[in-house]
Image: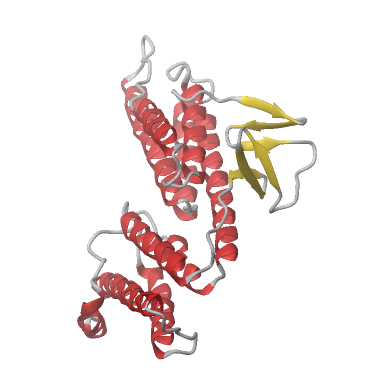
C-alpha cells in the first residue's frame, strides 16, 4: 500500500504529488529531486521527461502511441481502418437518425485518424529512403486535413464509460502532428496538472461526503492513498521503469478503496441501511472516476460535476440517518 510521504529538499516539500512552498514558482520551472527531474505547472510538480529530437520518425512514434491510447480510452468499435474511410464517410452522410449518426461520426473520426497515421507512415518511410518531403507536399496536406477533420468529429466520441465526451484526449495526435515536439510536451504537462487537480477535487469530495460517519472509519487514509497513487500514475510514462512500482500501487490502492465495506451501526433503521448501500455504490463510482481520469491523463469535467452534485445529495441523506 502506498503511504503518503512528506519529503524535504532545500526548504521545499513534496507530498502526494505536489511540491509545497511559501511562494509558488513559475510554470515551467524545473527542479531535481531524488535523481529525477520535476516541472512545475499550476501548483503541481510533475515528473519531467525531456522531449526526443524533433524528427519525423520520432513524431510518428509519438502519434502512433497517442492514437492507440485515444482508442483505448474511448468507446469500442470506432477504430475504423484507414482503408475504409470512404465507406465510413458514406455511412455517416446517409444516416439521419441523431443517435445513430453520432456513432457513425465517431467511426468516421476513427477512420480519419487511422488514414492520417497511414499517410504519415508512408511519409516517414519515404524520408528514411533519403527523399525529403516538404510541408507543402500533397501527402502532408492530406495528413493534416484528416487529423483536422477527425479532431472536429471527435466531439462526438465518448469515453469508454459512456459518461462524457473526451475530446481533450482525442485531440492529442493532432497536436503532436502540428506542434513542435517541445511545445507538445509542454501541453502534456499542463494537461497532467489539470488531471491532478481533478483527482484532488474528487478525493476531497469523497472525504467531505463521508466525513465523521462512524460507518466509514479509516476511509480518509484509503482515499489519500488512492489519490496519491493516481497522481503518480498520471505523471509517469509507461516507458519509465518506475511504472513497475507505480502501477501495482495504483491498482492495489484502487482495489482497497473499491472493496471498502461500511461498518453497520447497532440499531440502524431499514431506511439508513438502504442509504448506506447507496453510499457504498457512490464510493465505488468515485474510485472508478478517479481511475478513468488518471489513466486518460485529462480531466473529465462533466462527470466530475455530476458526481459532486450526487455526493451533495448523498451527504444530506446520510446526515438524516
Q: Is residue 58 left or right of residue 161?
A: right
Q: Is residue 171 visible?
A: no
User: Residue 24's image quarter?
Assistant: top right
Residue at position x 67%, y 45% from top?
Answer: 43
User: Is the N terminus in the top left, top right, bottom left or bottom right quadrant?
Assistant: top left
The foreground one among 129 and 268 is 129
- With respect to residue 255, does 201 lie above or below? below
Q: Is residue 47 left or right of residue 136?
A: right
Residue at position x 70%, y 27% from top?
Answer: 8
- With respect to residue 75, does 208 lie above or below? above
Residue 57: % across, % down: 43, 68
Residue 301: % across, % down: 50, 54
User: Residue 128's image quarter?
Assistant: bottom left
Residue 95: % across, % down: 22, 81
Q: Is residue 132 left or right of residue 157?
A: right
Residue 151: % across, % down: 42, 73
The foreground one among 133 and 296 is 133
Amino acid at each position: 500500500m502506498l503511504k503518503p510521504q512528506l519529503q524535504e529538499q532545500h526548504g521545499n516539500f513534496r507530498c502526494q504529488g505536489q511540491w509545497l512552498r511559501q511562494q509558488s514558482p513559475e510554470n515551467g520551472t524545473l527542479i531535481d529531486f531524488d535523481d529525477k527531474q520535476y516541472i512545475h505547472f499550476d501548483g503541481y510538480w510533475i515528473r519531467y521527461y525531456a522531449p526526443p529530437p524533433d524528427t519525423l520518425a520520432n513524431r510518428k512514434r509519438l502519434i502512433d502511441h497517442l492514437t492507440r491510447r485515444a482508442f483505448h480510452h474511448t468507446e469500442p468499435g470506432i477504430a475504423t481502418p484507414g482503408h475504409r474511410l470512404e465507406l465510413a464517410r458514406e455511412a455517416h452522410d446517409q444516416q439521419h437518425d441523431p443517435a445513430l449518426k453520432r456513432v457513425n461520426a465517431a467511426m468516421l473520426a476513427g477512420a480519419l485518424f487511422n488514414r492520417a497515421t497511414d499517410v504519415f507512415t508512408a511519409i516517414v518511410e519515404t524520408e528514411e529512403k533519403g527523399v525529403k518531403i516538404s510541408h507543402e507536399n500533397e501527402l502532408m496536406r492530406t495528413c493534416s486535413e484528416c487529423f483536422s477533420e477527425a479532431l472536429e468529429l471527435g466531439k462526438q466520441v465518448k469515453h469508454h464509460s459512456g459518461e462524457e465526451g473526451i475530446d481533450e484526449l482525442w485531440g492529442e495526435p493532432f497536436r503532436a502532428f502540428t506542434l513542435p515536439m517541445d511545445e507538445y510536451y509542454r501541453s502534456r504537462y499542463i494537461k497532467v496538472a489539470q488531471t491532478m487537480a481533478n483527482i484532488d477535487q474528487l478525493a476531497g469530495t469523497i472525504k467531505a461526503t463521508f466525513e465523521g460517519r462512524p460507518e466509514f472509519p479509516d476511509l480518509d487514509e484509503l482515499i489519500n492513498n488512492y489519490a496519491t497513487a493516481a497522481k503518480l500514475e498520471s505523471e509517469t510514462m509507461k516507458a519509465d521503469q518506475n511504472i513497475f512500482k507505480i502501477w501495482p500501487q495504483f491498482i492495489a490502492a484502487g482495489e482497497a478503496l473499491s472493496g471498502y465495506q461500511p461498518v453497520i451501526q447497532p440499531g440502524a433503521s431499514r431506511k439508513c441501511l438502504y442509504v448506506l448501500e447507496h453510499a457504498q455504490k457512490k464510493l465505488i463510482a468515485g474510485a472508478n472516476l478517479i481511475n478513468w481520469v488518471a489513466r486518460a491523463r485529462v480531466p473529465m469535467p462533466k462527470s466530475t460535476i455530476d458526481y459532486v452534485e450526487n455526493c451533495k445529495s448523498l451527504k444530506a441523506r446520510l446526515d438524516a440517518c
